[in-house]
Image: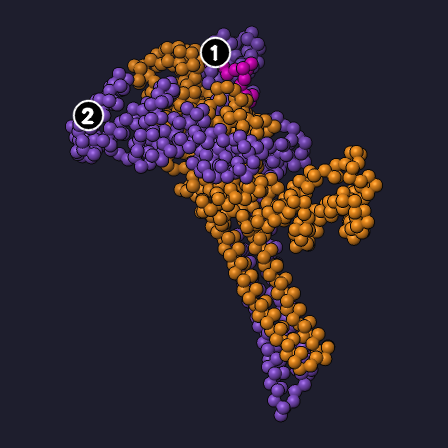
Chain colours: A orange, B purple
Amino acid sequence: MDHMDLDLDLDEPLTVEMDSDRSRRLFPRSFPGRSRSRSESPVDMESLSNGSATSATTATTTTTTTNTTNPPSATAPVPQPSKLAHLTESLKLEHQLLRVPFEHYKKTIRANHRAVEKEVSAVISGVSDAVDSDVSKDDAVHRLTSLVSRLQGLKRKLEEGSRVENLQAQRCRARLDHLESADAENLTDWNNTRLKRILVDYMLRMSYYDTALKLAESSNLLDLVDIDVFQEAKKVIDALQNKEVAPALAWCADNKSRLKKSKSKFEFQLRLQEFIELVRAGNDLRAITYARKYLAPWGATHMEELQKVIATLAFRSTTDCARYKVLFEPKQWDFLVDQFKQEFCKLYGMTLEPLLTIYLQAGLSALKTPYCYEDDCTKEDPLSQDSFRKLALPLPYSKQHHSKLVCYITKELMDTENPPQVLPNGHVYSTKALEEMSKKNNGKITCPRTGLVCEYSELVKAYIS
Amino acid sequence: MELTTIKDAFERVTKKQKLSSSKSQEVIDQVGHEIEQALGKIQSADDPTSPVDQQSILTDLKLKLNAIVPLHQLEASQKELNLNLSKYPKLLEKFFNPDISKAYRNVDFDFHIVNQTVANHFYRQGMFDLGDSILNEAGEPEATALRSQFLEMHQILEAVRVRNLEPALKWACINREKLKQNGSNIELKLHRLQFVEILQRGNLADSLNYARACLAPFASLHMEEIQKLMACLLFARRLDNSPYAEMTSPTHWENLTEELTGEFCRLLEQSYESPLSVAIAAGVEGLPTLLKLANVMAAKKQEWLAMKQLPVPVELGKEFQFHSIFVCPVSRDQSSEENPPMLLPCLHVLCKQSIMKLSKSGTRTFKCPYCPTEASVAHCRQLYF
């Protein structure tokens, strides 16, 4: 490639082999206005290329062969290899899809096992008790019968537990299969499903459960989204919004070891809030008892917060002192809801932000150019809309290392297959658009932006690297 | 995607889970069996000929249960399972990107806007109950702006699906002027399809009347097209086997749906594709690069949050190129109004600042960096993409 002299005359077919990145660039280091014949002495390209020209190829991952004599439509059904490389990369973003159902599965297994252990040891100590307490015969029969029925109950429970475990394992498998199924043929469908999954995730995190369920059901996505996992969160969130901490505390107890491992202080925060509520109600004595029992154990690690909250006993809920006033504000409960959501996501291996906002931010950043904010921005660009513009405002602009030219008329990319041509007034359009215009109007070209009329023969090709 | 390793690892987990489950069953059965036996013995002690001391039976039972060591058995099977349970997430973390929020900027993302965007996405896809539902759940009262428009669009498309063109024709007639301004001839296409439909039903008089009433007004602009349609009259009952068989192709209907959607959205000043789909698709393509960048910049969190432009390009597919961007091959700067692209006489393009530099502010001729042709500033002209 580097040593090929390109023949750029329209009369002769142009055959260029290039990698995909270069094919998007326009005539890399080609020689316009030079000889028509390929046999003429090729100029030593290497001596001309400075570092900037060679650095252009670094971002490439795949190679493709483009034959410019074929119309692009002939090759359209075959997806570009770069698309498949993109696909493989994007599948690696799907950690959450596999992780969440697995964490759920694991949790069920652990809970079932704990239940069995507990019951079996209870039965055994039941026998020991009977031995130790010198029972009558009827009493012994009675005790043993109840132990037997207890074991039967446990067996039923275990069977039910295994059934749930198997269902959850099946869900993990369904997701693996779904990831594996993504390929070139079903890419459009697969991408549509991904968008729906992302939307369900967003709605679940925002507590729009009904809509989430409707979308999952109507699109047959139930195995690919985590509605049941979020049901568990819903109970806690609903309670917190009603200013009840009991379900949240129960949730903390259920997940005690894992919360401890991640050094979570969510339980402490719940306890602080309960204490505040006692102070608000004027139950000072109860508040002090409560603090001794539930707050003191956190003293070693969170003394400062502890002291601050205890001080509300002195200031009371009517205080104007900003430092303590804020502790009595209702938004503290919203804060607890947020805190819970974070802990919950962490526990299940979810991202802390909804997938929708993560992808949306990345997409808007990649799409954002100064041109997006101009009045004549094409409607096809999401950033032509005020809503997306607002969302993108705090995001950085994208960066380009190579020219990418879009034809004003056809909105198609101008590249080697469809090179840009310059009108006498300096306006540039794609060859495709100009050829079509010239065919319709007997070789006349009208500039759509200035109204200038010229002959097709007056056009010159521009070479852009 | 090649997932064999992961699938195998997962099947190992489920195998251990089943094993552990059956072990639990077994232990429960064993314990139950011993208790039932002891119970039987005590109950059979009713027989006065062989008096049995229930206390010794119970002690015996206790010893037997201790010999089974049920808790130990349970623990052993669980231990193996636990090992696999903790291995699998590690494998996932290795194989996938465990935290895709690393490139996320913690900026205030206005959730009202996001909710409205999602609702409009649902409306656009024809999922009206979902759009209503999310607005309702999110408590967004005034966001139904595009609902009625997209409802009209979907009613038109729904009718087209059952080959009823009436609503589409009505819409095209009402918006005739605007469609003409957009250079669309969709109204003619609709009439053409309608005409062919009537013709295929076989009533010549109806067809002719329809042509007179509905096709004639297009004669001045689309004579050729109309001549062709009139010629179809000759083959009224056997259009399928005529030179005009192509007219009856179902692809016309498929294309019509697409074109109607396109023209409808254009009149609404909306894009053809859902902007939310486009932005998310761009995000999916761009995120891997951004995550790599975030990893490299992990130590400079502040810089990451403050930067006004990404330091590296994020390559997106052709379908995401909406704007012409010229990057000067010499300076690597993006062109701007102050620094526009200029065409050299040799037809290579550089930006103005590079040319000024090469020509020492226009004081001398210079060699194009891409070919040895001499050029002077006077012979360069500005380009407009």
Above or below — where is B13 with respect to A416? below
User: Pointer 1 indicates a residue of which chain?
Assistant: B
| Depth check, front residue: A364 or A402 | A364
Q: Position of residue A299 (x, y in %)?
A: 80, 48
Q: Position of residue A421 (x, y in %)?
A: 41, 18
Q: Which residue is mark 2?
A: B208
Residue B102 colored in magenta in the image = no
Q: Earlier in the sequence, mark 2 or mark 1?
A: 2
| Depth check, front residue: A453 or B207 | B207
Q: Secondary structure at mark 1?
A: strand
What residue is drawn where x is 61% and y is 28%?
A394
Quadrant the N terminus of chain A occupies: top left
- Label 2, label 1: how far apart the Cα atoms are: 58 Å
Span of residues in magenta: B332-346
In this rendering, position of residue A217 left or right of residue A36: right
Q: Which residue is mark 1?
A: B381
In this rendering, position of residue A353 left or right of residue A178: right
Q: Secondary structure at mark 2?
A: helix
